[in-house]
Image (cartoon, rainbow, N blue to C red):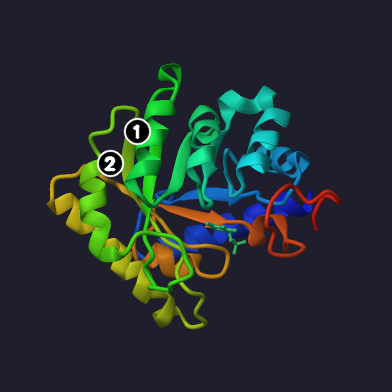
């Protein structure tokens, strides 16, 4: 068995154990495999081990990978999870199935306007700056409701819920706090009448805490594909990471 297939098995077991521990149904939480910096061959290996949903952070790298794996396109779902600038929205609208990182109305409006009708609605989450760090992307918690109300009616988007990347924390209690805050924000949107169902939260180091607080999608990179060579800024690792 390949390392990636073995890692996937381990992550699936962690997810199943976390679901059980949280009293949630088996298979309730979706696994998004974050393939950023890894070559198309790594995605193919994960695909052969049964994985179908993949996450990318950098537009050009994602487009290259989607093109390299065009023969699998109908079977895969591609999720854009990185910072998104206005001049890159068209490529994302035309090639991805999901965007987890919408943090302002202008980006959502462009994605809706640029989404090809033939593809059906683009699934989107609003990224929330849940730990309140000045440097991180995401909308402030206080502004989430207004942004969600503005995005929900856009014709070619389907607002699914919220995403966050909290500050890393070592103990499970500290990990759970920001995830609980995101869950409360989603509940507030539902109370407002918005039909949202997705909490995209939890990564390799904190997926158990996220599942305990209601994650519906966990985004896992390192635990599946291995350590990334360095914090990538853009482009695929030419050497074929790691
Ligand atoms: C890289 C990344 C992940 C995966 O992180 P790991 O710690 O490698 O599991 C998840 N979400 C986002 C937004 C990322 O950029």
* Left or right of 183 in this view: 33: right
Displayed quadrant of residue 118: top left
Q: Is mark 1 on a helix, strand or loop?
A: strand
The residue shown at (38%, 74%) is 176
Would you say the residues marked 1 and 2 are in contact, meaning their CB atoms lie under 8 Å apart? yes
Residue at the left extreme, as displayed = 192
Q: Is residue 189 above or below residue 207?
A: above
Residue at the front extreme, as displayed = 87
Q: Quadrant of the C terminus?
A: bottom right
Few, some or many residues within 10 Å of mark 1 (<14, 14–19, 20+): many
Q: Which label is found at residue 83?
A: none
Residue at the top extreme, as displayed = 118
The answer to whether any part of residue 34 appears in the image is: yes
Q: What element carries label 2?
A: helix
The residue shown at (55%, 30%) is 95
The residue shown at (45%, 61%) is 137
Point out the tag, 1 or 2, that comes first from the N-terminus.
Answer: 2
Identify the residue position indicated by label 2 in the image: 151
- Spot occupied by residue 56 in the image (x, y as percentages of width and height): 59, 46
Identify the residue position indicated by label 1 in the image: 157
Ligand number 1: quarter of image:
bottom right
Displayed quadrant of residue 41: top right
The residue shown at (65%, 32%) is 66
Between marks 1 and 2, how big is the CA–CA gap? 8 Å
């Amino acid at each position: 068995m390949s390392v990636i297939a073995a890692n996937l098995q381990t992550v699936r077991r962690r997810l199943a154990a976390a679901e059980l521990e949280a009293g949630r149904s088996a298979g309730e939480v979706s696994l998004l495999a974050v393939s950023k910096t890894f070559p198309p061959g790594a995605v193919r290996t994960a695909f052969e081990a049964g994985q179908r949903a993949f996450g990318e952070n950098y537009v050009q790298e994602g487009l290259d990978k989607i093109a390299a794996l065009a023969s699998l396109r109908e079977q895969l779902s591609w999720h854009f999870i990185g910072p998104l600038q206005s001049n890159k929205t068209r490529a994302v609208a035309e090639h991805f199935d999901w965007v987890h990182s919408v943090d302002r109305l202008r980006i959502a409006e462009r994605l809706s306007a640029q989404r090809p009708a033939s593809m059906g609605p683009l699934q989107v989450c609003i990224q929330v700056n849940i730990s309140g760090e000045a440097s991180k992307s995401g909308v402030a918690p206080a502004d989430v409701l207004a942004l969600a109300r503005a995005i929900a009616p856009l014709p070619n988007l389907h607002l699914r819920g919220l995403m966050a990347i909290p500050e890393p924390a070592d103990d499970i209690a500290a990990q759970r706090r920001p995830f609980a805050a995101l869950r409360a924000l989603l509940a507030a949107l539902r109370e407002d009448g918005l039909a949202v169902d997705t909490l995209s939260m939890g990564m390799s180091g904190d997926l158990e805490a996220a599942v305990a607080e209601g994650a519906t999608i966990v985004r896992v990179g390192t635990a599946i594909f291995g350590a990334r060579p360095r914090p990538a800024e853009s482009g695929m690792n030419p050497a074929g990471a790691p």
